[in-house]
């Protein structure tokens, strides 16, 4: 094979994405998912909208054009309009004079293109201590150096962040999932958000606020986004319809300064030109004709119960044996094992001996190093399955202690 | 704004993509399109398939999963199976032992990811003398140096190619659209294909064969792909459903050595994870349940007539005033103006004075330099419109000569 580019020589498929291939094997249990429950997808409503759209195509050529031809890279107008109303006006993200909202292929594409726009080879991205593996891979893909910053249950520590901003040369980006973080399930407090934003301005570093879960809150109080604090254009807000509508539409969006969006647009032209018209129009019509907020509340009711079941199961099975985060929303719990247990080995043991898939903590470490922690998902499994899987973890932990 | 990465500092939106915004203005005529005719889209058939899919979702959870959840990055199995039958088995692209076919977001994403996988900053991509602007931009996006190689009506000249392979350091990629080239409308002869492939092997350089138009042949004889000559894994074949089904599904594919595909997959995970399930299943079912070859023959009947109309109009209006290519398929004619006329200025004149959109030749030049040529599209306008637009070009040419 012709020599690969430096950036791709050591690139391997993400562990999490590769798990999709394993967990369809018969008899596997899983707390490894990262996706929403199929039960939340408004399939009937989308079927209804789809019928309308095809019906309109039969009498309106401009609808055929919108659905089946190429479209503008910035996104389909009706969807942009609905998302602006919700995410810019209602949630107060972005300054309407200087900022705008554009459609991308999931928040994932916003991450990739932000990296493309800001990272020269060797430039540094600072992330929470454990962070989304798909983002870390994207930063590596542009030869970024990804460094985790000390993080506790209230988010990234501003002092630790400032230390890194002083120590590391060429820091260009702070990547954060401040609300219901993946993998830790934590929420960055408002004070921390403000402090982190102030540091970004002080050191002239961009913040990429990745927030696909923020509307899935099951308890506690709403915390405004970092983007809502942004007065200087330093924050790119990446949102997604994957968790509140369906991942299958592959629709996300960015709210950012117009000059930043112009550059992301150039990148998107090269990657995929535009999102499919059908998917954009289905999503727009859903928001126009149905009540997305009410739908999200229904999702929250389902997930709240699952979250509670997992919290109760962990308390019942693992008190004194491990510690865990207490998420107020999102999909994930971060389980910290006794310090002598390798997360990598324990994850492998769970798969081999218990037929249980979880994700090893190292998958979320910018340096890929082993850590005594695993990520548990509660959005996908049934409550019975959650209880059973947590029991399997208890068994494995007890066997592990006996083994040692 | 925080300092941009070097690769993005001078990046501007593609001229062609930006035209989409201009030509919706009232009263504009256009030979500027790059897309297929709306009339070719099998909307009724897709409506029928869509109904079936939603109906199946109501009784089969695995269908909900396939359509609305995340999917594997490599692509939905039913679509891969259909495309392999057609493009690997029937058209003999790729060795079934060493090669495979995977789904991407248009051929565009294959281009972007090929660049990502093979180009270090400053590495060279050799293209036909005039080439697809969206590919040139993608190569620039990884700081590639793009160099056009002398090309005539039979394709890129092998001698000129070898000269460049010797002269330029770090050539990593030869990018070709060998069949119904964009923008020139030409077909690379089989002898040239073999000679170019042999040079790629000799100098260990990858070939990216971008072939979205090859099935749209209106006259002349089928020429086997470069990929079908590939014995060494040096050729990546990028195909697309945009021109034979609809661009709106945003579906393309790559046929390449499995090791190359593994790297493209890592890149795709970072960019957009996977294509939307709905779009993939609609396309798969269309190929399963309908006759794609017959559909393409219908498309060819429509386009052949438009091509003939454009050829006749050019002959009638511009004989002795300009020269043009005689495409046997695809969407484009390359019109060469008298050598003293600037393609950039003439294009601007056509828009301002004749309300006619064409694309200036410089949009397809790796060095962006002005050239006495413009690209004409015949797939979108009606035959009456084609005749009228060619007449407008004649008027503009005559006024230009008077002006001088």
Image (spheres, coloured by chain):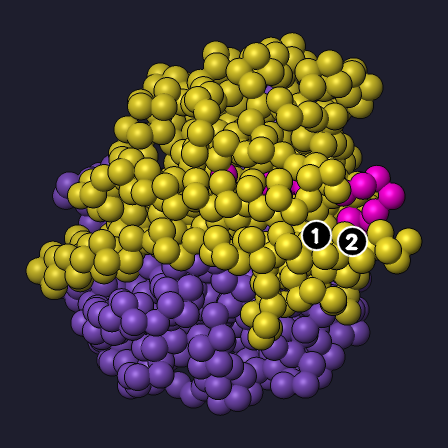
Chain colours: A yellow, B purple
Q: Counting other residues with Cα less than 10 Å from the Cα at mark 2, is it few (<14), some (14-19), or many (20 or more)?
A: few
Q: Is residue A328 above or below residue B47?
A: above
Q: Quadrant of residue B19?
A: top left
Secondary structure at numbered mark 2: helix
- The answer to if B387 sits in the magenta stretch is no
Image quadrant where residue B254 sits: bottom right
Magenta stretch: residue A345 in it?
A: yes
Q: Which mark is residue A394?
A: 1
**Residue B58 visible to the viewer:** yes
Left or right, A287 with reference to A116: left
Q: Nearer the viewer, residue A130 or A356?
A: A356
Residue extending farthest right: A404
**Circles 2 and 1 in contact, beta carbons < 8 Å:** yes
- Residue at horizontal 40%, vertical 57%? A38
Residue assigned mark 2: A398
Residue drawn 29% across the image and 36% down it: A293
Q: Is residue A237 above or below residue A351?
A: above
Q: Residue at x 18, y 57 (%)?
A: A48
Q: Chain of mark 2?
A: A
Which contiguous range is marked in magenta?
A330-346
Residue A124 vertical position relative to residue A227 in the rendered view, above or below: below
Q: Is residue A400 left or right of residue B30?
A: right
Residue plotted at (39% across, 85% down): B220
How far across and how far down the image is residue A143, in percent?
A: 74, 42
Q: How many marks?
A: 2
Quarter of the image with the C terminus of chain B in it: top left
């Amino acid at each position: 094979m012709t020599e690969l580019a430096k950036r791709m020589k050591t690139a391997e498929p993400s562990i999490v994405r590769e798990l999709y291939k394993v967990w369809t094997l018969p008899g596997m249990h899983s707390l490894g998912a990262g996706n929403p429950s199929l039960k939340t997808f408004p399939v009937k409503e989308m079927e209804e909208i789809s019928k309308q759209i095809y019906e309109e195509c039969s009498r309106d050529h401009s609808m055929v054009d919108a659905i089946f031809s190429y479209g503008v890279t910035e996104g389909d107008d009706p969807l942009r309009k609905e998302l602006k109303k919700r995410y810019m006006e209602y949630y107060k993200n972005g300054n309407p004079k200087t900022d705008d909202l554009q459609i991308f292929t999931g928040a994932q594409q916003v991450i990739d293109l932000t990296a493309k726009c800001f990272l020269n080879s060797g430039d540094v991205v600072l992330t929470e201590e454990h962070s989304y593996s798909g983002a870390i891979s994207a930063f590596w893909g542009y030869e970024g150096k990804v460094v985790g910053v000390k993080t506790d249950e209230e988010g990234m520590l501003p002092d630790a962040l400032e230390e890194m901003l002083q120590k590391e040369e060429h820091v260009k980006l702070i990547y954060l999932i401040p609300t219901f973080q993946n993998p830790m399930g934590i929420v960055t407090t408002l004070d921390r958000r403000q402090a982190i934003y102030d540091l970004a301005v002080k050191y002239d570093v961009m913040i990429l606020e990745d927030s696909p879960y923020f509307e899935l809150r099951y308890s506690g109080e709403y915390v405004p986004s970092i983007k809502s604090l942004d007065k200087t254009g330093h924050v790119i807000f990446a949102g997604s319809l994957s968790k509140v509508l369906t991942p299958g539409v592959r629709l996300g969006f960015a709210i950012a300064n117009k000059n930043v969006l112009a550059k992301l647009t150039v990148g998107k032209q090269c990657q995929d030109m535009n999102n499919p018209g059908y998917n954009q129009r289905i999503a727009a019509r859903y928001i126009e004709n149905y009540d997305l907020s009410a739908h999200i509340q229904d999702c929250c009711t389902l997930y709240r119960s699952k979250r509670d079941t997992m919290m109760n199961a962990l308390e019942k099975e693992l008190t004194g044996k491990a510690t865990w985060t207490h998420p107020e929303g999102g999909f994930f719990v971060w389980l910290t094992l006794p310090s002598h247990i390798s997360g990598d080995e324990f994850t492998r043991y769970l798969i081999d001996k218990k037929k249980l898939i979880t994700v090893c903590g190292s998958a979320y470490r910018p340096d890929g190093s082993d850590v005594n922690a695993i990520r548990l998902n509660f959005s996908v499994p049934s409550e019975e399955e959650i209880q059973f899987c947590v029991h399997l973890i208890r068994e494995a932990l007890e066997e592990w202690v006996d083994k040692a």
